[in-house]
Image: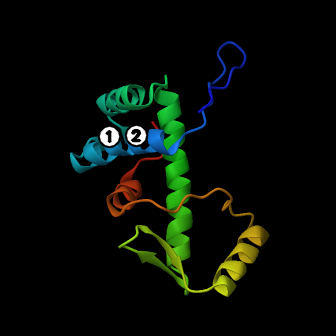
Amino acid sequence: MSLGKGKKGARNYITWTDEMDSALLEVLVEHHENGDHTQNGWKAHVYIAAIRNVREKCSIDINKDNVIARCKTFNKYYVIIIKMLSQSGFEWDWKNNKLSIDSDDVWAKYVEASVKSNEPIKNLDLSTPEEILEALEEIPEGD
């Protein structure tokens, strides 16, 4: 994990680890199940709980902007996964909690089409558990 340093008042960018994602998603899933979000974002106490959980479990200082940015990243991943699953040759492997691809040819065609459409697929982690996928569908994009 790294914390970006910049000009005074500039955003602090961080590189999220799997451990940080898990700590964040643990809180978001719990609060999603409790209905703690609005049309425009999570309720204030959800951000506080998420920040506290990541700090406690990962010993890293994050803020609300970091949480909002990560939720936007999750939304982008969700959109990509849903597009993949709507196409022939892709399915969700519920046993292993990952995307299953019928063949290398299916993947090659998808990558080629994605490059042409400028769709972001680089560094996409597709090992998200079922309950997180369900929660991602409901995560608001912003504050």
- Spot the residue most to the left: 34
Label 1: which residue? 27
- Asked whether the beta carbons under mark 2 and mark 1 sit within 8 Å of each other, the answer is yes
- The residue at 56%/65% (across/down) is 80
Picture coordinates of residue 38, whole percent (x, y): 33, 42
Residue type at numbered disc 2: Leu
Picture coordinates of residue 101, whole percent (x, y): 55, 80
Give the spatial CA distance, label 2 vs label 1: 6 Å
Is 2 situated left or right of 33 in this image? Answer: right
Task: State the quadrant of the N terminus.
Answer: top right
| Viewer-nearest residue: 26 or 6 | 26
The answer to whether residue 139 is above or below residue 23 is below
Picture coordinates of residue 67, whole percent (x, y): 47, 35
Q: Is residue 120 visible?
A: yes
| Viewer-nearest residue: 88 or 138 | 88
Q: Residues within 10 Å of mark 2 (few under 14, many from 20)?
A: many
Q: Is residue 40 visible?
A: no
- The residue at 47%/61% (across/down) is 127
Residue type at numbered disc 1: Val
What kind of element bears circle 2?
helix
| Viewer-nearest residue: 85 or 126 | 126
The answer to whether residue 10 is above or below residue 76 is above
What kind of element bears circle 1?
helix
Label 2: which residue? 24
- The residue at 41%/55% (across/down) is 136
Tag of residue 19: none
Q: Residues within 10 Å of mark 1 (few under 14, many from 20)?
A: many
- Spot the residue most to the top: 8
Picture coordinates of residue 64, whole percent (x, y): 46, 28
Is 27 situated left or right of 65 in this image? Answer: left
